[in-house]
Image (tube, helix red, strand yellow):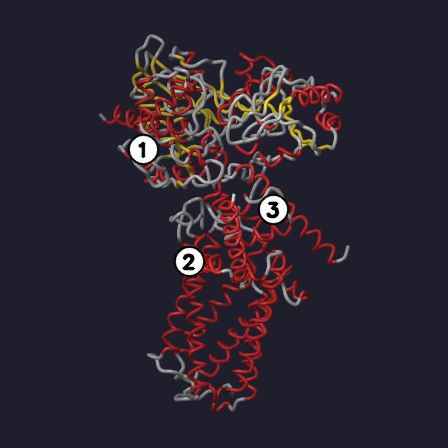
Amino acid sequence: MSLIDVIDLQSAQLHDEARRAMEVCNACRYCEGFCAVFPAMELRRDFTNGDLDYLANLCHNCQGCFHSCQYAPPHPFGINVPKALAELRYQTYRDYAWPPSMARVFDRNGTLVCLLAALSVAVLVTCIVLLRDPGILFQPQTGPGAFYRIMPWGLLSALAGASFVYSLVALGMGFRNFWRASERPTSDLTRPRPLMQALHDVFTLKYLGGNGRGCNDLSDNFTMLRRRLHHAMFYGFLLCFASTSVATLYDHFWNWPAPYPLLSAPVLLGLVGGLGLIVGCSGLIWVKVQTDPAPSARALLGADYALLTLLLLSSVTGLVLLTLRETSAMGLLLAVHFGFILALFLALPYSKFVHGIYRSGALLRYALEREDEHASHASN
Amino acid sequence: MVDLTRLYDVLVIGGGNAALCAAITAREAGASVLLVESAPKPFRGGNTRHTRNLRAMHEKPTSVLTESYLEDEYWDDLLRVTGGQTNEELARLTIRETQASLPWLEARGVMFQPSLTGTLNLSRTNAFFLGGGKQLVNSLFNTAQRLGVEVLYDTEVTELVLDDGFVRDVKIVSRGFPASVRTKAVVASSGGFQGNIEWLKQYWGEAADNFLIRGTPYAQGKVLRNLLDQGAHAIGDPTQFHCVGIDARAPKFDGGIATRLDCIPFSIVLNQKGERFYDEGEDVWPKRYAIWGRLIAQQPGQIGFPIVDSKAEKLFMPSVFPAYRANTIAELATQMGLDPAATEKTVAEYNASVRAGTFDTTKLDDCHTEGLSPPKSHWARTIDEPPFIGYPLRPGITFTYLGLKVDEKARVLMSDGKPTANLFASGEIMSGNILGKGYLAGFGMSIGTVFGRISGREAAKRVLN
């Protein structure tokens, strides 16, 4: 049996299990108040593989439907929706990956993302140590352009720019694959009302809010823990991105090179964002360690831990660099920090990060289906 | 760790809604409480695990209920379904107390949701549990244990030693080991006996082997039996139960909601001999939902086979089991184990007697049969467009009506009419006082919550005074 056959067989099994679960759920429907998955399911009687891929990406893994399920194991029906959908969701990351040959990076994703990070840091540190005069590298560097005396501006911006642009393209192509599978027209992507609804659901993490009391993050108790931690991480990430963007503007258009003073926009944005990332990522790692294992797809945790750890290390090294930037440690710290950032940029399309792209797409598809449904009711 | 050498104020028997409401109420009143649940933890919660909503009186819209639902309308609804087999004093007490039940449960962690698809007719009267009854069970167990209620799973009460209306001793089997519980008062919230097939056979004979039990297998009725044997006053017809038609392929126990089939009004239902036996279009489905279990129980082999054609397929909720499906009636009959010739004959006679009208699922339409016995009064359309679709149906028992007679303080009454001193009951074990016949959606949970709270309060009052 070739590798392709094995992957096809695995994909068929994942679809079969998700289909079996959805057919039981569709005859029960007790969970329809939890999230978007169940109302979307109720619009269907039969589930194509494409429908199941969509439902899998609509699932936020809140686990409410598992803990309240009268058919959960050890019941003979053995229904475990969060696990079935998580395993299928992960399969869709392979299916939508661009270029298609990169699907295999999701097979041992935790290991690969960690190796990438280690390699990236090692290469940058090695280059700096080999290429820079120790007299400059291990001397405190201060004032405008201090960073570029360690790492030339051209190299820095070329590496960062190229990796970031590549990742954007790969993510975009992945989204294109996702949307093609939905068989909806491209024009649907910009229908204003569904788009606004989807953006609202994405930016508020509506479906990690339950009915105001949150989700079953750790057990059958309801908490807002995961939603708050995810918010800290997500908005922390955006603030760090804003920090980098502002710094790029300062550098390119105002000819004001880094490092910037403590009370400047890039440093304040990065400081708050970095703290958000540290709280969010370490908290989410803790949740994953503590949570009831039954509804989790344990085999997929590697990818989760790898991305969270990479984000965590990026922000920790950033804050350490900020603290020690006027000391002789700055040179090596800069290389280490930039190594993690570079790895993060490169890993975006090939890590758990893609869930944000596909889940947003699924929420948009859901908003479109809802609007179509309302329209068809209104016209009847 | 539960310490069985300790003297508890209140022992609660059971792990469903009524038991949890009783345990929490008694604990909040200051009593020490031990709750014993006969199921292991994953199956805790009795039939509450399979429930979905609670019927609640309200004067104005609440967090999840629309408009208003007042005492007299609620009472009328109950009177209609029970045909008068109720106790007005206890029923009205229950109805009035449901008003406070919803906020009480919400304050103890239970999550509700507005009713959604398929149940809109209940959005005014019934509050739906987010995720269903198991979420209520989880939330109330969490609250009870946070308050200090002690819990033993996999623990069955085998005997309450009654001495002149006073519980002297409680014998249990905990995880297989016999023991005693020392307690000052007992609340029995241990459900009916529908899980006890041998008991059902006393009234139904071997036919009971073909009954499916929609809920928990742990409703064995041991406490009920034990108390009746010691002279407790019985109430409710022991031979009767609430029973609907469910897919015959459902598991023997715990099949719950997903095994039900709503296709009967759009079908003709055949018995094992390939013959029809009752008017499938008699009335709107919600009003006839509950009679088909008994109708099928009275047929040979306790099995029935609704048949529809492709026209009707999308008119009812999808089933959890795949339908039998064939391009000819004879082929479908063979798949279902029916005689093809008899089945074809029944379908042909039915088709010939159908008088076409304006088909309308939302009302009692004028599509009916003429000259057919039994007739199909509404939604009668010819069955002639393949593929033909069929399901096997068996009686699915929801709960039994036999119970313990109680007073307004939830005290168990003896046959001589005297109340017991320290024995209280709530939930299905006493719901026959109020719901002696029929079924009213969400009302079992209303009785459980109201009498659960009363029994917990009265038990605590008894031991703390």
- Residue A227 is situated, as x and y percent measured from the top left of the image, at 42, 56
Residue shown at the point (66%, 63%) measured from the top left? A104
Q: Name the residue under label 1.
A: B58
Three-letter code, disc 3: Ala
Q: Label 2 sits on what residue type?
A: Thr
Q: Name the residue under label 2.
A: A204
Gap in angstroms between the C-alphas marked 3 and 2: 27 Å
Above or below: residue A362 compared with residue B41: below
- Residue that protrudes farthest toward the left in the picture: B465
Left or right: residue B421 compared with residue A291: left
Question: Does any portion of residue B184 appear in the rendered image?
Answer: no
| Secondary structure type for disc 1 | loop
What secondary structure is marked by label 3?
helix
Considering every residue shown, the one lying at the far top of the view is B416
Do badges 3 and 2 share one subunit? yes
Residue at mark 3 to residue at mark 1: CA–CA distance: 41 Å
Q: Which of marks 1 and 2 is in front?
A: 1
